[in-house]
Image: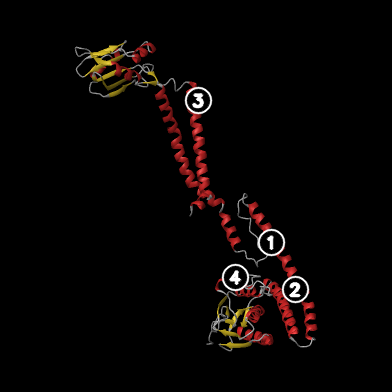
Amino acid sequence: MTETARSHCLQTRLVWRLISLQAGLLAILAILVIGTLWGAGFLLDVRDEDHVIDIVQQAVARDTSGGLLLRSTPELAQLREEIPDLWFVVRDGQGHRLSEGAVPPDFAGIVEALSHISQARLGWQLLADDLSKPAARLKRVETAAGKVQILTATQGKLSGRKAVLMSSLSFLGIVLPGLLLMTAATFIATPMVVKRALAGLAMIADQARRIDIHQRGARLSVEHVADEIAPLVRAVNEALARLDDGYSRHQRFVADAAHELRTPIAILNTRLESLPPGAEKTRLLEDTARLSTLTEQLLDIQRLDQCRSPFTPVDVVAVAQGVAADLAPLAIAAGYELSLQVAADRIETLGDHAAIERAVTNLVQNAIQHGGRHGTISIHVSRPATIEVTDEGPGIPAEQRALIFEPFYRVTPLDRGAGLGLNMVREIARMHGGHISVLDGPNGGACFRLTLPPRPSLPPAPSAK
């Protein structure tokens, strides 16, 4: 799948938009919760057990005799002002000790007993003791006097830096697990929901692919599509109905016009026949013949579009013989010889006899019109069910061979032909499951090859026992 196609995938866009929405909602929720706690003072009242230990750690030093002393630092001075009942005990590995404040009797001698402990939190039993007593914090730290143990039960206020860090950790602790869980659920559930919701759309697309230009009244089903897609399907059905109506009106116009033209053309042809022989009479008869051919082609287009009768066996040899007999006078009058060659007495295909006859007629008429008025026009019928019409004219340039079967296309722009005959031959070939192609003729002209599928062989009848 290309990058452009992927960016327009409904499922992918829906998944990422849902994840973005969930992340935004979780972030807003976490900010509201933390902001509410902060505004109510809960986060500001959180005490920092290590606050006193950190300040004392920076103030501990040694005197000249190797004992412990406290240097006067601004932080320590501020701590003494903020906490009137401040107390702590400091002890090193050599037994030196200093303390400040009224050390509770419960903790007075505990530092010596826990000299091998790096850090601990000393609390009280939940049911048996007075929970109003603060828990003590013991921690071994590195100071200017070396490693010492500091014990205190005093807790300082949470610093702004630690408050921000704690808020950030709380934010991530709330948002990340929820976002990960919701993202996983979205990736799993969204494709299932989209697939289930759009299940009927695949059936509609398949119906649309099967609609053919010759299929009237085709409509898409709205039974199994979602309500949000149903208006689009109904709009497509309305467009199909308008196309059907316009095509029908167009077909009626073409048929009516062709029928109306047949009578005056027949009258004109009769009057021309009464003229004395001459070159002018010949040219006028050729013109009326082309006009009559155009009229028949218009009627053939209508008949071809309305052809719904089941196919029957058609002998293409007999078709070619009939066309050759009908058009031989016209070909001879135009300066050609007409040749018919067949590979067998009977070669059959399944199809519409009138349509196949019209296709062969159009090929021969095309050869008469564009064959240069000299040489031989050959009709060759071979197996499985192939009809070739060859002339000895100028031929068709290779770059135009794919275009000559389009309606109203002419190799010579000023040519008086309508450009419908070869297009009709192609449509008749397609209707029968065959194809039409143009090749170089053996003597320099054009060779049109109409290939039709052979009639399937009937299974042998069971023998009587």
Secondary element at tag 2? helix
In the image, residue 391 above or below residue 408: below
Mark 3 or mark 1: which comes first in sequence?
3
Within 10 angstroms of label 2, few (less than 14), some, or many (20 or more) residues?
many
Question: Which residue is tagged 1?
Answer: 243
Residue 182 position, x and y percent, is 47, 40
Q: In front here: 280 or 435?
A: 280
Mark 1 or mark 2: which comes first in sequence?
1
Question: Which residue is tagged 4?
Answer: 403
In the image, residue 206 above or below residue 402: above
Question: In the displayed structure, does residue 388 sit left or right of residue 102?
Answer: right
Question: In the displayed structure, does residue 48 sit left or right of residue 257?
Answer: left
Determine the residue located farthest toward the front in the rendered image.
279
Question: Which residue is tagged 3?
Answer: 36
- Distance (Cα) linking label 3 and label 1: 64 Å
- Distance (Cα) linking label 1 and label 2: 22 Å
